[in-house]
Amino acid sequence: MQHSQSSTLAERNKKSNKVIFTWTLAWVLSLALLAFGPKFVWDFAVGYSIAVIVVNLFCGYKMIMANKMMLEGLDELQRKLHMNAMAISLGVSMIFGAVYGLLEGIRLIDFHPNPSSILVVMGLSYVISLLIGTRKYQ
């Protein structure tokens, strides 16, 4: 993303946050439609499900690119804080996901693990890591 020299860091961050919010919302809504649409809207018609999968993947791609552009627009300290939070979130999610996926098989839980739980852990670990990192430099 090319930034004009006249745009301030605050202006770039505000614009990036709007773009990330928009694509994240689109991704979440398309994921919800994919989760509930087949049963409640289109009676498991394969064509509709495939179309929503394509929309979801597109929105996910745009969300990833918006995050990448946001990182490119940050100053060095902000970028470091976000990258550290991402690394911690990836590690926590990988470790949690691996163990969580095995809990039913080893009979420590009596329900099938839900992938959305991993997304919650990922989001929370990212936000907490970012808050702790930001607090460290204040």
Image (cartoon, rainbow, N blue to C red):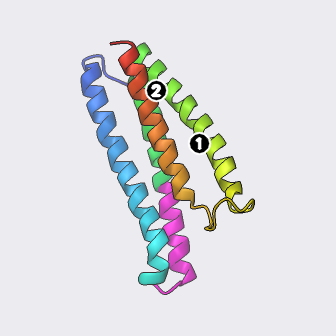
How many marks can you see?
Answer: 2
SS of the residue under disc 1: helix
In the rendered image of this protein, does residue 127 appear above or below residue 40? above
Name the residue located 64 percent from the left edge and 52 percent from the top edge: 100
The quadrant in which residue 91 appears is: top right
Q: Which of pointers 1 and 2 indicates the residue nearer the eye?
A: 1
Disc 1: which residue? 93
Name the residue located 43 percent from the left edge and 32 percent from the top edge: 128
Disc 2: which residue? 82
Q: Quadrant of the N terminus?
A: top left
Q: Are marks 1 and 2 in contact (CB under 8 Å)?
A: no
The quadrant in which residue 92 appears is: top right
Residue 72 is situated, as x and y percent measured from the top left of the image, at 44, 25
Residue 127 is situated, as x and y percent measured from the top left of the image, at 41, 35
Q: Quadrant of the C terminus?
A: top left
Q: Main secondary structure of the magenta part?
A: helix
The disc, 1 or 2, on the residue closer to the chain's N-terminal end is 2
Residue 37 is situated, as x and y percent measured from the top left of the image, at 44, 76
In depth, the one of 138 and 70 nearer the eye is 138
Q: Amino acid at mark 1?
A: Ser
In depth, the one of 40 and 64 nearer the eye is 40
The verdict on residue 67 being magenta is no
Q: Amino acid at mark 2?
A: His
Q: Is residue 80 visible?
A: yes
Q: Is residue 101 left or right of residue 74?
A: right
The verdict on residue 50 being magenta is yes
The magenta stretch is 42-58
Q: Is residue 92 left or right of residue 120?
A: right
In the rendered image of this protein, does residue 70 appear above or below residue 45? above
Name the residue located 45 percent from the left edge and 54 percent from the top edge: 59
Q: Is residue 121 left or right of residue 8?
A: right
SS of the residue under disc 2: helix
